[in-house]
Amino acid sequence: MKTMWEYDILANKDSIENTFEALEMNWIHPYLVKNKEEATEKILNLIPNHQEIMNMTSVSLAEMGIDKMINTSTDYISIRRLMNNEKITKIEKKRLWTAQEWAIWSVHAITEKWQILIASATWSQLPSYSYWANNLILVVWTQKIVKDINEWFERINEYVFPLENARAMEVYWVWSWINKILIINKEVIAWRIHIIFVEEKLWF
């Protein structure tokens, strides 16, 4: 098992290359950028104007400024902005939340053997990632690349969860939980999933 500080180290060149090769073989499109500014630029290049976009709750995206940019810009149709409309029904809100043209988030780890792993307390974002979003963009800091699923479980339990639990208590005054886990082994729609790997440490 790794120590806490080892989970915080950015992946080396060989690890990144192995991960990219495995993802591409499984119809998932990886990109490598140097920092959050380049990641933001890549996101905006991928998304056409006037498309529906759902930015899922993510500290990384918030610190990058993507949340604010999407939700205030008239260039995009912000799902979160639409959901603030008091006239839409609960069923309409569920549709907006689960089936968008574009969804943006991060993940908890990606293995060198191609698996994408996402843990959730509520599962609310998982339908979009698994199928219903027409296009999915994931932003991943390269310290989240792990050797295999066993190392992922160690990372989520020993490193990520304690930090996320502390954050949830501070922000929401409730505990976090690892209630549901999504593992993506391969995408069945060749153009759907894009992963932007960032060679800069931000958050956990």
Image (cartoon, rainbow, N blue to C red):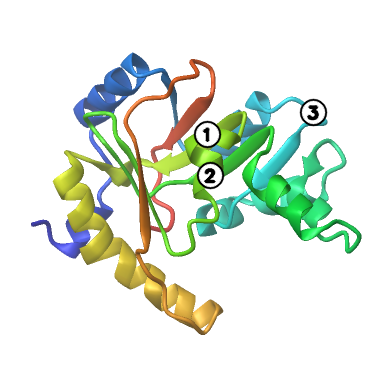
Q: Are marks 2 and 3 in contact (CB under 8 Å)?
A: no
Please identify the residue farthest to the right as the structure is shown: 87
* 12 to 168, vertically: above or below: above
Q: Is residue 12 visible?
A: yes
Q: Quadrant of the rendered structure where residue 74 is? A: top right
* 101 to 2, vertically: above or below: above
Question: In the image, 162: left or right of 101?
Answer: left
Question: In the image, 145: left or right of 203?
Answer: left
Residue type for callout 1: Tyr
Real-space Cα separation, disc 2 to disc 3, in angstroms = 24 Å
Q: SS for tag 3?
A: loop
Nearer the observer: mark 2 or 3; the answer is 2
Question: In the image, 30: left or right of 117?
Answer: right
Residue 49 is marked as 3
Q: Are marks 2 and 1 in contact (CB under 8 Å)?
A: yes
Picture quarter with the N terminus:
bottom left
Report which residue position mark 1 lands on: 131
Q: Residues within 10 Å of mark 1 (few under 14, many from 20)?
A: some
Residue type for callout 2: Pro
Residue 127 is marked as 2
Question: In the image, 76: left or right of 2?
Answer: right
Picture quarter with the C terminus:
bottom left
Q: Residues within 10 Å of mark 3 (few under 14, many from 20)?
A: few
